[in-house]
Image: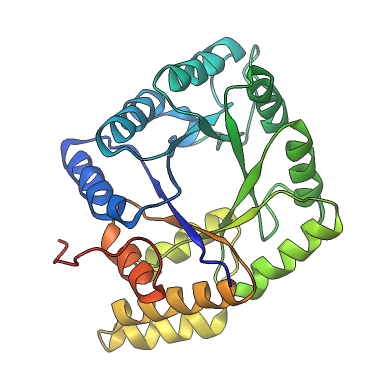
Amino acid sequence: MTRPRISFEFFPPQSLDASFRLWEAVQVLAPLDPSFVSVTYGAGGATRQLTQEAVGTIGRNYGLNVAGHLTCVGASRAETMAVAEGYAAAGVSEIVALRGDPPKGAAGFEAHPDGFADSVELVQALADTGKFKIRVAAYAERHPEAGDPLADIRWLKRKVEAGASSAITQFFFEAETFLRFRDLCVREGITVPIIPGILPIQSWEGTKRFAARCGASIPARLDESYHYAIRDGREDLLSLTQCTTLCDRLISEGVEDLHFYTLNRPALTREVVRVLGLGAPVALGKVA
């Protein structure tokens, strides 16, 4: 069995305290030898400059392979490609190309008058530069805007045809959700790696709100388990068990990459990786 590769997602800080949390997260997880790490944009591209700064700093100071996120929201084509060129100048060779969420309060996505209409156009423009390995988003469950169950897969295929070399899924709670999606992708002729996005559950109530916004279905049995675990003070133990069990099942089904959404809180992610026996061995100490 192939030893799976691991990768981590961080988000850029918007305050001094958040900055300390980001750099602690990077310091804790960097020794695990991830194949890459990524840094997100805020909704509507709100953290564009902060993302660029974080990507550059992580690459320079930690020697990690960093993939910068890039979205179409609220920017012209020239402005968007200027960000990509800034990544290239900083030595970044990977981009996670996304349409992006609309700004807070907006009814839905609306393309900039001089901007990219969608993620396919963005992927194509990035591919035309010849400078980047391009990763894109995928949805193991139906995207809230998708018209039918296969719409997401057809759209993913268009992004692959435009130049994407891999896709990272939205998080999910059951391995079968990802495995069914992977099978459908193969049936539809998508041959690039489909990487499962894993969300270690830091707070069950917060995770449920997040899931409702992005369309991730919540298994009733898991909700019930958290009800009793929270009551009995065992939420952290359940989160560790749930995440390692999910990952172990995926690995047993031949998954070769796991991408962890860390939320800049590294302790649980590190413990999951340790229990799974992945990553480079590190001395474990207390993490605040």
Q: Is residue 226 visible?
A: yes
Q: Residue furthest front?
A: 1
Q: Residue at x 32, y 26 (%)?
A: 53
Q: Is residue 103 visible?
A: no
Residue 182 in the figure: left or right of residue 186: left
Residue 5 in the figure: left or right of residue 57: right
Residue 129 image-quadrant placement: top right
Residue 162 image-quadrant placement: top right
Residue 158 location, x and y as percent?
79, 38
Q: Is residue 140 above or below residue 65?
A: below
Colour option used: rainbow
Q: Residue at x 49, y 81 (%)?
A: 222
Q: Tell me the quadrant of the picture where the C terminus can be found.
A: bottom left
Q: Is residue 98 above or below residue 78?
A: below
Q: Is residue 21 above or below residue 159?
A: below
Q: Residue at x 47, y 85 (%)?
A: 224
Residue 219 in the figure: left or right of residue 287: right
Residue 105 location, x and y as percent?
50, 36
